[in-house]
Amino acid sequence: MKDAFGLPQSLLVLGGTSEIALATARRLIARRTRTVWLAGRPGAALDQAAEKLRALGADARTVAFDALDPESHEAVLGKVFAEGDIDLVLLAFGVHGDQAHDERDPVRAVRVAQTNYTGAVSAGLVAARALQSQGHGSMVVLSSVSAERARRADFIYGSSKAGLDAFAQGLGDALHGTGVHVMVVRPGDVRATAPAGLRENALATTPEAVAAAIELGLRRRSETVWVPGALRLVMSALRHAPRSVFRRLPI
C-alpha cells in the first residue's frame, strides 16, 4: 500500500532499462519503495539495473517482457501481480527510431508505432485491470511533448506518442472512481546529463528532473505533468500556431 504521502511501497516498471524509470525508482527507493519489478528484455542491462537497485536496499526483481509480444502480456504481468499488490505501474518503454531512415522504410516505422502505441495499449489495459482488481494503485504513463504536436523532425515518433497520450487520458477517465489513478507525464527533450545552456532550452530536461516531477505528481495525484513545467505554456502556443508558421520553426 502507499504511504501517508501517497508514495508507493511497490513498483512495477514496464521498460526496466529506461533511464527515466530507473531515476524514478532510485528516487522512490530513497523515500519508501521496497519492492521493484523491472520488466524488460532479458540481458545484462536489465540484470545490472536490478543489481544497482538492490544496492540501494530494494528487493529488485526482473521479469521478461516484450512490448512487441502483446499475446504474452497477460501471463507476464499476471505473474507479477500474483506475487503481491503493486502500488505503482510505470509504463516507460518506447523507442524514438530514426526519422530519416524510418520514412524510407515503412517496416521500421511500423515497429516504432507498434512499440510505442499498440504495445502500450496492450500492457496498459492488462495492468489497469490488475490494479482495478486489487482496488488501488497508480499508473504513470511516459508520454512526450511530441504528443502535443508532431514536428517535421520526428512525426513518426510524435504520432505514436500522440496515440499513447490519448489512450492514457481515456484510460484515466475510464478508471476514475475505481481507486486507480492514471498520470500522464510529458517530458521535453530528455538528456542523460544537463548540458551547458539547458535552462535556456525550454524543451530540455533530464531523467532526474522527470523523476522529481513524477514524485511530486504522485503526491498531488496529478493527472498531467509537464517537465519542465514551462512546456505547458510553450506547447499551448505551438499547438495553436498556423501550420504555415509551425513548419518553419527551428524545433
Image (cartoon, helix red, strand yellow):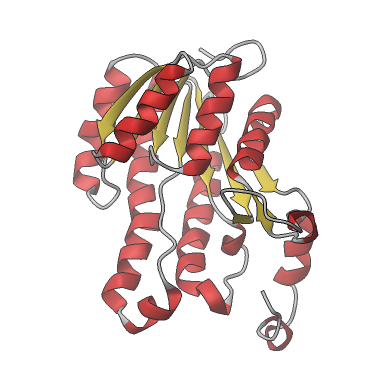
Q: Residue furthest bottom?
A: 244
The residue depicted at 24 percent of the width and 47 percent of the height is 70
- In this view, 209 is above or below 198: above
Say left or right for 183 vs 117.
right
- In this view, 25 is above or below 162: above
Residue 161 location (% of width, % of height): 49, 59
- In this view, 171 is above or below 152: above
- In this view, 187 is above or below 97: above
Question: 56 or 118, which is in the foreground?
Answer: 56
Residue 164 location (% of width, % of height): 47, 54
Residue 66, located in which quarter of the rendered image? top left
Asked whether residue 175 is in view, the answer is no
The residue depicted at 70 percent of the width and 69 percent of the height is 239
Say left or right for 206 vs 202.
left
Residue 134 location (% of width, % of height): 40, 18
Question: 184 or 13, which is in the foreground?
Answer: 13
Quarter of the image with the C terminus is bottom right
Asked whether residue 1 is in view, the answer is yes
Question: 125 or 14, which is in the foreground?
Answer: 14
The residue depicted at 59 percent of the width and 53 percent of the height is 190
